[in-house]
Amino acid sequence: MNEILEQYFDVSQMSKHFGEVLDGFAITLELALVATVLALIWGLLLALLRQLPGRGLLPVRFLAIGYIDVFRGVPLLILILLISGSLAFLPLPEALTIPQWFGKPDNFWYGIMALVLVYGAYYAEVYRAGIEAVPSGQMEAARSLGMSHGQAMRNVIVPQAVRKVIAPMLNEFTALLKDTTLVSVIALNEVALVGRDIQSKTFNSSALTLGAILFLIIVLPLARLVDKLIARERARTSRGGAPPVMHH
Amino acid sequence: MAEPMLRLVGIHKRFGELEVLRGIDLEVQRGEVVCVLGPSGSGKSTLLRCVNLLEPPEKGEVFVEGKDICRGPASPAGEAGWKLDFVRQRVGIVFQQFNLFPHKTALENVTMAPEKVLGRPTAEARSKATQLLERVGLGDKLGEYPERLSGGQQQRVAIARALAMDPHVMLFDEVTSALDPELVKEVLDVMRELAEEGMTMIVVTHELGFAREVGDRVVFMDDGAIVEQGNPADVLDSPREERTRKFLGLVLDR
C-alpha cells in the first residue's frame, strides 16, 4: 500500500519537481488559451458559412458541412503528426512552414494548428446549436425591419446564440485543455512531457500525478460553473419562455 | 382613381401539399384599415407574410404603391425579387409573439433598424425612438429589457419598432392573441390612434369589436380564399355567406 502511494503521491518528489511541472503546465495553458481563442473565431466563421441562405450559396454550405464532419472525425493525434511531420517540406514560405511567431517554437504552432482545425469544427457545431435555438421569429422580425441576412445575424441572432452556448463552450474548453497533452508527442515541453521525463529519470510517477492535479484545479471549478450556468438558463427559459438576457 | 397603396392579384401559396392561399385578390387604398377575419388555418397570416415577402408567393403579383415587388431576377440569397429593401422599408409588420430582441432594451429595439438599415445617426434615431415610445405610452420604459415588460407593453414596443422605419403600410398579425385579456385594450388603443392618424393598415384579428369600430372594411377568409368582404357592419351583422355566419356564430358564442 505504501509503495503504491509513494509511486503516485510522493510529496517530496512533487515538491522537488514542482517548478518544472508548473512551467510545463504554463505551456499547456498557453496552448489551450491561444487555441481556444482562434478556434472560437474559426468555429463561428464555419457556423455562419453553414447558415448562409439561398440556393446560390449551397456549395459554400456543403463545403462548411464537409469540413466540419471531416475534422470532427479525424483523430487529433494523427493531425498533429501530419502537420508537424510534413509542413516543413512543403514549398511555402518558411514563415508559414516553420512558424516562430511571438517567440514560440514551431512545434507550439503545429500543436495550435491541429487543435484549431479540430476544435474549430467542434465549436462550429456548438454555435450551430445556439443559432438554431434562437426562435425563428427573431430572424423574421429582423428581416422584416429591412435588415439583410448578415445584419440580422450580426445584430440579432449571433449575440443571442453566444449567450446560449457559454456553458457548452466551457465544456469544450475542458476537453481542449486536456487534449493539449497530445502535443507532447512532438516534443513540446508541456506538462505531460515534463512529467514523463521526470518519470523515466526517477522511476516515480508523482510528477505526472501533480500535472493531473493541476488540470483538476482548473477543470473542477469550471464543471461547477457550467452547472450553475445551465441551471440559470433553465430557470430563465421556464419562466414564460423568454429567451435569456444578460444584463450589463 | 388614385393608385391603391397595396394591390394583390391572384396570390397563390402552398407549403408542400398544403395549398394555403388559392388565388387572393385584394386592394387596399391609402389610409384604409382592412380587418381580416377567419378561422385559424384559413391563410390570413400567410397572406400578410406574402405582402412583405417573408413568404414569397408562388403565383400572383403584389403591388406596393404601384410597384410590382414580386418581379425581377432572384437575388443571390434566393429570395423573391430585388425589391426586398423597397418592401421591407415601406411595409411594417407586428407579430403575434412580439419577437422583440431580448438582448436589447426597449429603446435599442426601436433604434436598431433605423441605425443599421437606414444609417441614421445614433442621436437622431434615439430621439425619434423616444418620441415613438412615448407615443405608445412607454416613455418611462426606455431602458427596460423585454423580459421585464408585460405582454401588452412588449407589443407596444414592437409597434413603435415597426413605426421607426416610417412604413407606409402596417400589417398586424393577430397582435392581441397572445395577450392576457386585460392587456388587449392598451394595444388596440394604440392601433386605433394609428388608424385615426391615417395609417394604411391590414389587421388580422379575432377582435370583432375593433373590426367594427376601426375597420373601413372587413374581409372574411376561409380555406385560402376570400369568402366575402364589405363594410364592417354589413359583414358582421348580415353576412351573405353561410361560412361567414357560422364563423361569426362560433366567435360570438365564446
Image: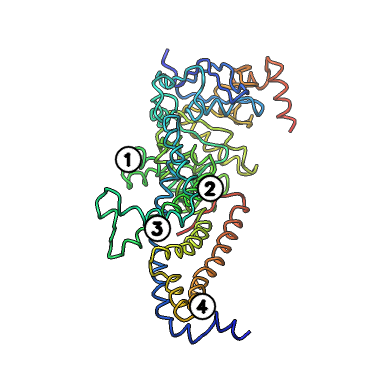
Query: Could you tell me which chain the residue with mark 4 belongs to?
Result: A
Q: Which residue is mark 3?
A: A37
Tell if the residue under mark 4 belongs to the same chain as the one under mark 3: yes
The numbered mark, 4 or 3, whose residue comes first in the sequence reads 3
Q: Which residue is mark 4?
A: A205
Q: Secondary structure at mark 1?
A: loop
Task: Kindly indicate whether the residue at mark 2 contacts the one at mark 1 (C-beta within 8 angstroms).
Answer: no
The amino acid at mark 4 is: Ser
Q: Tag on residue A129? A: 2
Task: Compute the Cα span from label 3 to label 1.
Answer: 32 Å
The amino acid at mark 1 is: Gly
Q: Is residue A102 left or right of residue B245?
A: left
Give coordinates of residue B81: x percent, y percent: 41, 24
Using the image as rendered, state which of residue B212 and residue A10 is in the foreground: A10
Q: Secondary structure at mark 2?
A: helix
Disc 2 crowd rating (10 Å Cα; few below 14, some 14-19, many 20+) is: some
Q: Which residue is mark 1?
A: B119
- Observer-side mark, 1 or 4, equals 4
Task: Compute the Cα span from label 1 to label 4.
Answer: 64 Å
Task: Compute the Cα span from label 3 to label 2.
Answer: 19 Å
